[in-house]
Every structure is written in structure tokens, then in C-alpha cells.
Image: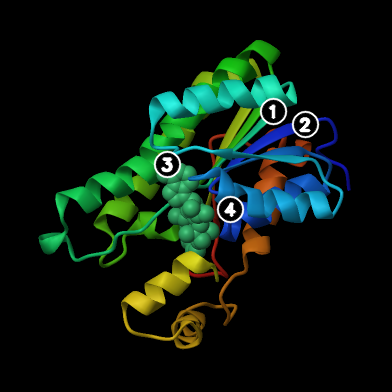
Amino acid sequence: MTRFAGRVAVVTGAGQGIGAATAHRLAEEGATVAVIDLTAERAQATVDALTAKGHAARAYGCDVADHDAVRQTFAQVVTDLGALHILVNNAGITRDNLFFKMPKGDWDAVIAVNLTSAYNCSQAAQTHMVKQKYGKIVSLSSRSALGNRGQANYAAAKAGIQGLTATLAIELGPYNINVNAVAPGYIATPMTVSTAERVGATAGDHQAQAADRTPLRRVGQPEEIASVVAFLASEDASYVSGQTLYVNGGAR
Ligand code: NAD
């Protein structure tokens, strides 16, 4: 499939996990991908894997929580790659703790990296998308948006993504820009491996517990989120906007 031939896509937090899988999926379908991560070195690992397969990609180091750095990086992407058609707001972190002892710094960091980053990146991207009257913005929410013990900061940020998505769809729709979100359940990535370590479980045991709670009786893989992001970024979803799609193995 070449659904993204001639398209330029920015994927944030694409050094590993869901972001890296998404960068691969978009590139495999013809996109030139700007791979953003905290440092250019982290992004370069994904770019090396993509170019080894003959795909077009370029690495950028940028803290997506930093408004000015995002503006500069996105301008550089357009200078380097010629346009910006697709934005995937994927970068995210967790700083889990019960609410009564959650440090202010952990609240601020999670809101900044998971929610304010989407404001920063979407605002920088829409400048270019509005001019060309074409754009796709897909942001990573989470099943945790519905509430999850120990994740007040993360749940608030991921619920915020859903409100931002619904509102940007209204404001940017007249410029032919589709804005949607994906809300994964438990996906096997370095993020969930860290969560397992923090609670003193092995990654395998932690995943087995999550699988037991999931109707499909297994956890998800990054490629199973990447394929849904790709759908929402493609013309197959041309009349879908303002939606949050839960991708969680059937859990309610
Ligand atoms: P991950 O931790 O494996 O990867 C996240 C990437 O984001 C890393 O490469 C990291 O360096 C980068 N990053 C972190 N802070 C950044 C910043 N300030 N600027 C730029 N890059 C930054 O995470 P993942 O599991 O692949 O998750 C990707 C997205 O999906 C996140 O938004 C996460 O909240 C969401 N999500 C994940 C799961 C899951 O189970 N893994 C479930 C629901 C939602």
C-alpha cells in the first residue's frame, strides 16, 4: 500500500515503542517521516532502521513540552522536507503515584509532556496545514482517560487530549484538516516494562495480569496501534474527525 506517497509526517516520541512502530508504518506506506524524540540520538535509531529498509526519514531532537523548541523544529522540518501533512502526537511519559502523595513536579511533567505537547505541536503544525488546506492530526490518548488508580496526572492529560481533539476538529475542519485520537489499552512497550519494574513485577507477569483483564486475552503490540493511527491519517478515514478510537482488546 502507498496511502502516504508524497506525504510528510511528523511523529513525536518515535525513538521507541508506539511512535517507532508508527514511523515504520507510515514510511512503509510511502511517507517521508520526521522522527522526533527528546534527543537527536534517540530519534536517529529509528531513522537508521527506516533508511536501512530504503525509507525516507530524518531525525530531530526536540522536547515537545518546550513551545519555542517545537516551533523551531517544525519550521526546520518544513524547510528540510518541503511540507507537513501528518502530525502524530505520540510522545508521552508516566509518573504514577496515588493522588494524595503525588508531587507537584510529577503532575506538571505529565501534563506538559502528554497534553501541552499536543497544544505545542498541533499549533505549530496547523500553521502549515491551514495554508495548504490539508492535514491529519492524530494524538495518543489512553484508556486511562476513563480513570485509573495511581494515574491522576496521566488520566487528566489523556482526557485532555480527547477534549483538545474534539475542539480542533471543529476549528480546523473548515481547512480540510482531520483531527482524531487513539486511546490504547495495555501495549507491550518500554513504557509498560518500566511500569512493571516500578511495581516489582516482571514484564511477563505484568502482561499476563493485563491479558487476564482483556477480552482478547492478550496485551496489544505497538504495530496494532500504528495501524490504527495510519488508518486515521489516511484517506480511508477522510470523513472521520473529532473522534477518539479505543484500541484495547475489547475491554469496557
Ligand atoms: P515509550 O515510553 O515506550 O516511548 C515514548 C517515547 O517518547 C520515548 O522515545 C521518549 O524518549 C519520548 N519522549 C518522552 N518525553 C518526550 C519529550 N518531552 N519530547 C520528545 N519525546 C519525548 O511509550 P509508548 O508506550 O510507546 O507510548 C507512546 C504513547 O502512547 C504515549 O503518549 C503513551 O502515553 C501512549 N499510550 C501508551 C500505552 C501503553 O500501554 N504503552 C497505553 C496507552 C497510551
Q: Which amino acid does label 1 sit on?
A: His
Mark 1 and mark 2 residues within 8 Å of each other at the beta carbon: yes
Mark 3 or 4: the one toward you: 4
Pointer 2 residue = 7
Name the secondary structure under disc 2: loop
Specify the farthest residue to the front: 41
Residue 227 occupies quadrant: bottom right
- Discs 1, 4 touching: Cβ within 8 Å: no
| Label 4 sits on residue | 15
Count numbered badges in the picture: 4
Is residue 62 found left or right of 201 in the rendered image? right
Which of the 4 quarters of the picture holds residue 5?
top right
Contact? badges 2 and 4 (CB < 8 Å): no
Question: What residue is disc 3 on?
Answer: 161
Provide residue 30's location: percent of width, then percent of height.
84, 41
Q: Residue 85 carries which label?
A: 1
Image coords of residue 167 (percent x, y): 45, 28
Q: Residue at x 77, y 41 (%)?
A: 236
Compute the Cα span from label 1 to label 4.
20 Å
- Mark 3 vs mark 4, CA separation in Å: 21 Å
Query: Nearer the observer, disc 3 or disc 1?
Result: 1
Q: Can you give x and y, in whole percent of width and height, for residue 146 in the image?
A: 36, 57
C-alpha span from label 2 to label 4: 20 Å
- Asked if the residue at tag 3 contacts the one at tag 2, i.e. Cβ–Cβ closer than 8 Å, the answer is no
Nearest the camera: 61 or 32? 61
Sequence-first tag of 2 and 4: 2
Mark 4 or mark 3, which is nearer the start of the sequence? 4
| Side (left or right) of 191 relative to 53 | left
Point out the tag, 3 or 1, that comes first from the N-terminus.
1
Q: Is residue 107 above or below residue 252?
A: above
Element on which disc 1 rests: loop
